Image (cartoon, rainbow, N blue to C red):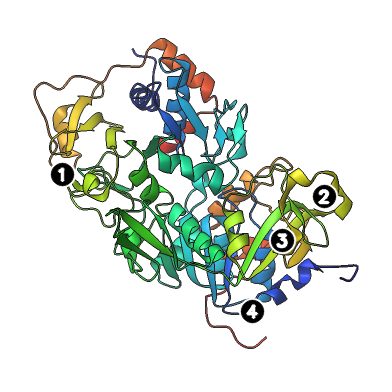
């Protein structure tokens, strides 16, 4: 029997996509990416930069609180970026280059909705809002998506509202707007996906242990790109599991898997 | 200036905010929002506000619950790990309030344009999203005729009033944040016509002269100062007190039961009211 849980598999799969050139920052309700940034930094990407809450540069917190915009995440930082002027120009000029999104809805090109279900003016469900999604989807060269609810309600053909841009309407959309990069990867509770280099549509990379390709297809509301044999997502190592539990001792990451 | 200078009693806070004002409320998510001030607006029954809050939670939820808000101009409204802001959500879903959503950076740009006295501030943030197409009078895509570069023009947003919470202030309006973390507050202070600061402590001006490098806002930028100890509760006033997680949890639990919620709201905030137009005051 394996000694890891689904949240630890998802964190590990995301962390393994990060390298030393990641200069990341995080927004609200980002327990999984925050844990993944710290894990990557503690293992294969010691040069990774993480600005906690987009405020605390190179923070080394003792644990992760109920808010990923909270001071309890800022321990051990080398600087507090304490105003818009201290932070936004680095996201605009590319010195900071990576951000992770979740969305109530995600489409095949990695565009996301966190604004409303239904119409904007008469919403069926009013969601918290995009916050920095609209900004950082544009500005960041390396965008990563995660979801703990891989189902046809989340992974949809058409968003009810586009709060943040992924690859937009097609492969050339970002370039036509003058935007760098785009979404690289999407890690869910069922699978790891990336984006086909030509069509920029979501492509299945691996399925998690115990999950079949058919289950992922059935859980996705749009047509996935599937090429050849799909491998299994590598399990977390014992060392990765140990580190995750040490970096997030209260299990804040599990909040996203309710 | 008189001895009391710019000091106003917390109990008189609502007299600074006419019905129908546009008011920017500071803080960041669970951090340092001027909650005591918001409570006074609820208790006084201030109506018809255009509330500007970039990344907020409890402050917007209280003002909406008190029936103070006509329109919310926002980037993100939630309690983060403590869930969705329940009164905001209900008011938006029943269309009891108008909601205008922008992104964090486009809202910063709108406030910066107001401070600079220019019609709009350009940014690349928001391109290709629906956020910028909701209200063309506030945000719209444009093309620079010389470079051909696409950008979002964020029209100046000038609040009538901005209110922020700080650690220390003096009667002249000098303001200290300890540490100097000012996030969206700094844009709000510079953009608004009238600026109000609530502070944990009122201190001597000499203490500002002793450490001018710690001053966040100069006295000339501030119109009114209110002494409000624990004035950010239940949000955090770091490092002096953390957010009150137990209150957030109790608030969410009560939100499932209208009677229990009205009691909790009455005890900690004020009367729950539906939104509506303001009368004479």
Determine whether A219 is above or below A18 in the image. Answer: below
Please tell me which residue lies in front, A250 or B260: A250
Residue at 12% from the left image edge and 34% from the top image edge: A225
In the image, residue B71 sits, relative to residue B53, either above or below, namely: below
Question: What residue is at 45 percent from the left and 53 percent from the top?
Answer: B105
Q: Earlier in the sequence, mark 2 or mark 4?
A: 4
**Quadrant, the C terminus of chain A:** top left
| Residue B99, numbered label | none
Characterize the local packing of mark 3: few (<14), some (14-19) or many (20 or more) Cα atoms within 10 angstroms: many
Answer left or right for B40 relative to A245.
Answer: right
Q: Between B238 and B267, which is closer to the camera in this rendering?
A: B238
What's the distance in space between the residues labelled 2 and 3, CA to CA?
16 Å
Rate crowding at label 4 as few (under 14), some (14 to 19) or many (20 or more) other CA atoms within 10 Å.
Answer: some
The earlier-in-sequence mark between 3 and 4 is 4
Q: CA distance from mark 3 to mark 4?
A: 17 Å
Evaluate whether label 3 is on the same chain as label 1: no
Q: Position of residue B227 (x, y in %)?
A: 80, 60
Please report, as a chain letter, where disc 4 is located. Answer: B
Residue under disc 2 on the same chain as residue under disc 3: yes
Of tags 2 and 3, the one toward the viewer is: 2
Against B150, residue A25 (above or below) is: above
Read off the chain for label 2. B
Give me the C-alpha separation between circle 1 and circle 4. Answer: 51 Å
Residue wearing tag 2: B208
The residue furthest front is B146
Q: Which mark is residue B18?
A: 4
Instruction: Please tell me which residue lies in front, A83 or A159.
Output: A83
In which chain is the residue bearing label 3? B
Label 1 crowd bin: few (<14), some (14–19), many (20+), radius 10 Å = some
**Residue A187 location (% of width, % of height):** 30, 31
Q: Residue furthest left?
A: A228
């Amino acid at each position: 029997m394996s000694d890891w849980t689904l949240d630890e598999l998802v964190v590990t799969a995301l962390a393994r996509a990060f390298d030393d050139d990641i200069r990341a920052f995080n927004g609200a309700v980002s327990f999984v990416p925050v844990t993944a940034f710290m894990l990557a930094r503690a293992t294969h990407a010691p040069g990774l930069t993480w600005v906690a809450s987009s405020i605390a540069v190179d923070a080394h917190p003792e644990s992760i609180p109920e808010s990923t915009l909270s001071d309890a995440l800022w321990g051990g930082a080398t600087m507090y970026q304490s105003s818009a002027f201290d932070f936004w120009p680095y996201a605009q000029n590319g010195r900071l280059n990576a951000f992770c999104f979740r969305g109530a809805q995600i489409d095949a090109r990695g565009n996301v909705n966190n604004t409303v279900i239904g119409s904007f003016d008469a919403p069926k469900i009013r969601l918290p809002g995009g916050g920095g999604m609209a900004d950082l989807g544009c500005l960041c060269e390396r965008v990563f998506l995660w979801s703990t609810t891989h189902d046809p309600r989340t992974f949809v053909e058409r968003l009810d509202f586009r709060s943040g841009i992924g690859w937009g309407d097609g492969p050339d959309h970002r370039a036509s707007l003058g935007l760098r990069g785009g979404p690289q990867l999407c890690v869910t509770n069922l699978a790891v996906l990336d984006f086909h280099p030509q069509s920029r549509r979501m492509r299945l990379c691996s399925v998690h242990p115990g999950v079949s390709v058919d289950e992922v297809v059935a859980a996705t509301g749009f047509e996935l790109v599937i090429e050849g044999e799909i491998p299994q997502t590598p399990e977390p190592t014992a060392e990765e599991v140990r580190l995750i539990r040490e970096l997030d001792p209260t299990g804040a990451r599990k909040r996203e898997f309710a | 200036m008189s001895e009391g200078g710019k000091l106003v009693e917390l109990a008189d806070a609502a007299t600074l905010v006419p019905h129908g004002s546009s008011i920017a409320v500071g803080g960041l998510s669970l951090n340092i929002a001027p909650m005591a001030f918001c409570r006074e607006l609820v208790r006084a029954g201030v109506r018809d506000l255009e509330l500007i809050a970039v990344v907020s939670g409890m402050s917007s939820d209280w003002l909406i619950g008190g029936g103070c808000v006509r329109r919310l101009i926002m980037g993100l409204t939630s309690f983060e790990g403590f869930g969705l802001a329940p009164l905001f959500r209900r008011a938006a879903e029943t269309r009891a309030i108008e909601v205008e959503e922008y992104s964090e950076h486009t809202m910063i740009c709108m406030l910066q344009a107001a401070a600079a006295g220019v019609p709009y501030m350009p940014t690349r943030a928001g391109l290709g999203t629906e956020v910028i197409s909701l209200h063309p009078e506030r945000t719209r895509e444009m093309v620079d005729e010389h470079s051909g570069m696409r950008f979002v023009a964020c029209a100046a947003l000038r609040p009538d009033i901005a209110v922020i919470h700080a650690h220390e202030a003096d009667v002249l309006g000098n303001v200290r944040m300890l540490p100097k973390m000012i996030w969206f507050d700094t844009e709000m202070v510079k953009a608004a016509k009238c600026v109000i600061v609530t502070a944990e402590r009122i201190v001597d001006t000499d203490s500002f002269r002793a450490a001018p490098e710690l001053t966040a806002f100069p006295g000339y930028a501030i119109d009114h100062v209110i002494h409000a100890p624990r004035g950010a509760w239940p949000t955090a006033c770091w490092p002096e007190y953390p957010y009150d997680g137990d209150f957030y949890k109790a608030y969410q639990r009560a939100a499932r039961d209208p009677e229990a919620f009205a009691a909790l709201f009455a005890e900690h905030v004020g009367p729950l009211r539906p939104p509506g137009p303001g009368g004479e005051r």
